[in-house]
Amino acid sequence: MNPNNDAGYFPRWTLRRDGVIAADERLPTSQTVLLGLQHVVAMFGATVLAPLLMGFDPNVAILFSGIGTLIFFVAVGGRVPSYLGSSFSFIAVVIAATGYAGSGLNANLPVALGGIVSAGVLYAAIGVAVMLVGYQWIERLMPPVVTGSVVAVIGLNLAPIAVKGISASSLDTWIGIATILAVGLVAVRAPGLARRLPILVGGIIGYMLYALLTNGAGLGKPIDFSTVVNAPWIGLPKLSSPVFDGNAIVLIVPVAIVLVAENLGHVKAVAAMTGRNLDPYLGRAFLGDGLATIVAGAGGGTGVTTYAENIGVMAVTKIYSTLIFVVAAAVAIVLGFSPKFGAMIMTIPGPVLGGLSIVVFGLITATGGRIWVQNHVDFSRARNLVTAAVTLTIGAGDLALKLGGFTLGGIGTATFGAILLYQLLRDGESPAAETGTASATPR
């Protein structure tokens, strides 16, 4: 690290033309722009898919992903390279809170936005607490067995929605299966950077196959491109205002805890890749992500989170300059002001979305298992085994808990249940014994 880059709130970004590019270094302008565009491509598939599954306007979601990334950049002083995209953690609770039917725009969008803003407030408050007292209390409250269980629950809870998306007809089922296979083949067999973009590339393949069979061969409902043709290239996004409903807030607010665990893991991963201690910036990272979620929810966007897709691109390129994400954010904001771009996204066929959903929700579930494996969670310990077993069953079965006039949904019940159960089932063993390693810290 160049000590001269730490003189102010923001680094001075020393110019470097080759090799590993650190967060406080930069490439020449032309290369910075190109790499910024690459990060837009990396985040695009998931950032667009999440709002479509919740009935949000994808144009607005893209716009606020760019704005949120800039907020995060300022919050961490330009020292933690990350892109903020649409969070999948909100999907199940938003659908439950709004009764979204699965197609078109969500009629109860304002109610969902109120819950998202509230989750962002809690998330930002946790960030301030971490800035004041450190983050170790989070690791004690939410050790790997808890965070892995909660992450897995999100995917399991969403599974019926994904399957429903490809079950309307035989054609839909086969298109969904073809999309799943395309995503898998891209992830395993595609060359170079394309292998890092399976959702985007696989979705395009599924889209083209559907268009060929319907618009071309007349085997199903064709894609209607008239809205794309009639939409202007440039226009103001259709913003929405939140409505604060108690039941929706109770359902959605627990997602903040998931976002904390997710962001903690991502910052740790970036620190490991860059060889720099980013622990001093964890509180600011939580605060930045929380503020970005508040701003997004206040205008009609989805809640946001740091993106593993873009972390993957950094792992491949070895370029961690935070200025690249400023470029990516600026491009996303420009796309948010293009109604034609948004209209094109809205033409994505339902079975293609369903196929992508099965993959993404399955990956979320598998990520929970990966957290257990990477942290060597010891399931011979009854405390760990019971916590995981009860959490998964409650979440997958969508157990709702009535609290007076409020109802806590399956994910919220599972989240708080996992935290409380783990703390109640103390057996006197050290954290090392619970994980089966010398340390409970993620590697």
Image (cartoon, helix red, strand yellow):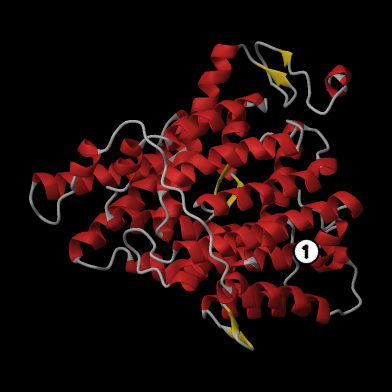
In the rendered view, tell whether residue 197 sits above or below residue 324. below
Image point (69%, 63%), residue name? 257
Rendered location of residue 37, percent (x, y): 49, 26
Left or right, 185 with respect to 310, comes to left
Q: Quadrant of the N terminus?
A: top right
Image point (34%, 45%), residue name? 203
Crowd band around label 1 with a 10 angstrom C-alpha radius: few (<14), some (14–19), many (20+): many
Between 404 and 42, the one lying in front of the other is 404
Left or right, 16 with respect to 349, comes to right
Q: Amino acid at mark 1?
A: Pro
- Secondary element at image label 1: loop
Between 409 and 390, the one lying in front of the other is 409
Rendered location of residue 74, percent (x, y): 71, 34
Q: Is residue 381 visible?
A: no
Residue at the spot of label 1? 143
Between 71 and 93, the one lying in front of the other is 71
In the rendered view, tell whether residue 43 sits above or below residue 425. above
Rendered location of residue 389, percent (x, y): 64, 78
Between 331 and 242, the one lying in front of the other is 242
Left or right, 220 with respect to 274, comes to left
Q: Residue furthest left?
A: 218
In the rendered image, which quarter is residue 4 located in?
top right
Rendered location of residue 147, percent (x, y): 69, 63
Left or right, 245 with respect to 358, comes to right
- Total tally of numbered discs in the picture: 1
Image point (71%, 57%), residue name? 123
Q: Is residue 12 visible?
A: yes
Image point (60%, 42%), residue name? 68
